[in-house]
Image (tube, rainbow, N blue to C red):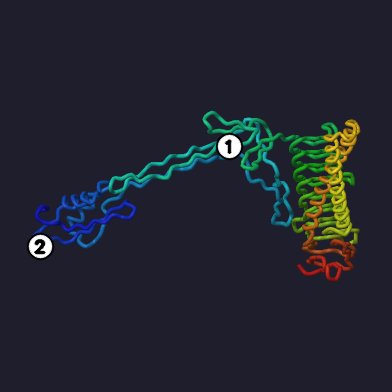
Amino acid sequence: MADKVSKPVQVRISSDGMEAFIKLERPPEGEKLEVKDVMEELERNGINTGINEETVRDMVRTEMFHIERRVAVGVPPQDGVDGYYIYNYERELNAKPIILDDGSVDYWNCNSIAIVEKDDVIAEYVPAEPGENGVNVRGLPVPCKRGKELLPLKGRGFSRSEDGRKYTADITGKIEESGGRIIISNVYEIRGDVDLSVGCIDFSGDVLIHGAVRDGISIKATGSITVDGIVEGAYLECGGDIILKSGLLGNSKAEIYTRGNLIAKFIEFARVEAEGTIQAETFMESEVVCNSSIILDGTRSKIIGGFTSAVESIEANIIGNAVGVQTLIKVGVDQELKVHMDEIRKRIMDTEANLRRVEQGIAIIEKQEQTQLATFDDLKTKKMQLLRVKIRDTSDLSADKVELEHLEFLEKKSKNARIVVKDTIFAGTRIMIGDYVSEIKNNDVRITYMPNDEDACIRAFRS
């Protein structure tokens, strides 16, 4: 019968070649559509993969005419999976204190360094899965997306296994990521107090102390300093951040200097200076100098007594107290700094002019050396004198330019200097913004102070 009549089977293939559909038309009267007729039509259309013969038979048996149904499905490709690393150390450190529900501040969660032990597996590599090609309904391959392998980890302080799967720490120390590299460096870790029996510390790297720092101790580090216990009348200096989880009780003897940020639960009876930001809950009778912003966190935050200065801003709930203890608050930069900047600019101009004269003198001597207009020894002596002046002036010029750049940066940061009082500022507190000075005559609440250059005074407005 199939040879006598063209059987009415319409075939459609999806645009991606992954599905085939048929629609049966009613055959002429007296003719009957057979399954083999449908299969032959599929074959003529090149469909040879993923055919559901049961669906074809069901459509023919039930005479399902004028309804399109899917009768073939290809095998979809299984995309590969890119290789990836599993890191076994803390990669996102929390260097900010957490304000608790009762308004107090939790400094124990602050952490600026992650520590690994020697032979710890710091990372594991999971290789890429290649994937598997699919096949469309015509039996043609459908390529999969191949998984990509990652490059080996780069850095120092760790080793890679022969199969490239595991990375192991070579030393106990601080682990950090910088510029796409993993660096494990030495950490001086003390599991207890630092007192005179331990001695002073001067370390190239990070210092981690799990106890207190007692009176008379000096700690210097090129990296960060983290102290779990109380810091007493000690000297701390570092190139990174300082985190004092239990605070600083300085006994009027403590001094701290950091080129980074400072985080401390409280600072009492101490002198503190930081290039970065300072965060704490309480300042008490201390001298605190900051080249960025000072933020006192929590509903209990306060500054009582002493001198507190920041280039950008100072924020606290309470400043001063009811008995009028002398409290001085300063933000911005004053005229003295601007005068100093002008002095440095003039010094730079003078040094550059002198260097030009020295260069000219050296050039003249070198020309005389060629023409022998003077004795060789005389020329050599004069040239050496000028070269010494050139070296000295070049060094001085470089130092002055670095200092000027730093001061100009501070001046720029001070443009929006402000003091923010979230609760109460008490009478008797003295505030300074740049060159403007004001003494608070009456208690005030929720107020912000900023400079008013037009009227050469300090402007106050409600927060």
Asked whether 463 or 42 is in front, the reply is: 42
**Amino acid identity at mark 2:** Glu
Q: Residues within 10 Å of mark 1 (few under 14, many from 20)?
A: some
Report the amino acid beneath label 1. Leu
Q: Is residue 48 left or right of residue 266?
A: left
Identify the disc placed on residue 128. none
Residue 147 higher or lower than 34, as above or below: above
Q: Position of residue 228 (x, y in %)?
A: 75, 42
Rate crowding at label 2 as few (under 14), some (14 to 19) or many (20 or more) other CA atoms within 10 Å: few
Closer to the chain start, of discs 2 and 1, is: 2
Q: Residue 45 at what x, y percent from top left?
A: 23, 51
Q: How many marks?
A: 2
The CA distance from mark 2 to mark 1 is: 75 Å
The answer to whether residue 163 is left or right of residue 168 is left
Answer above or below: position of 346 versus 367.
below
Image position of 459 with respect to 174: above or below: below
Q: Which residue is mark 2?
A: 29
Residue at x 35% of width, y 45% of height: 134
Q: Please give the residue where the numbered disc 1 appears in the rendered image.
A: 153
Residue 254 position within the rendered picture, expressed as x and y whole percent measured from the top left: 86, 44
Q: On the image, which quarter does residue 329 sit in?
A: bottom right
| Residue 6 visible (yes or no) | yes
Q: Is residue 270 visible?
A: no
Determine the residue positioned at 81% across, 38% down. 219
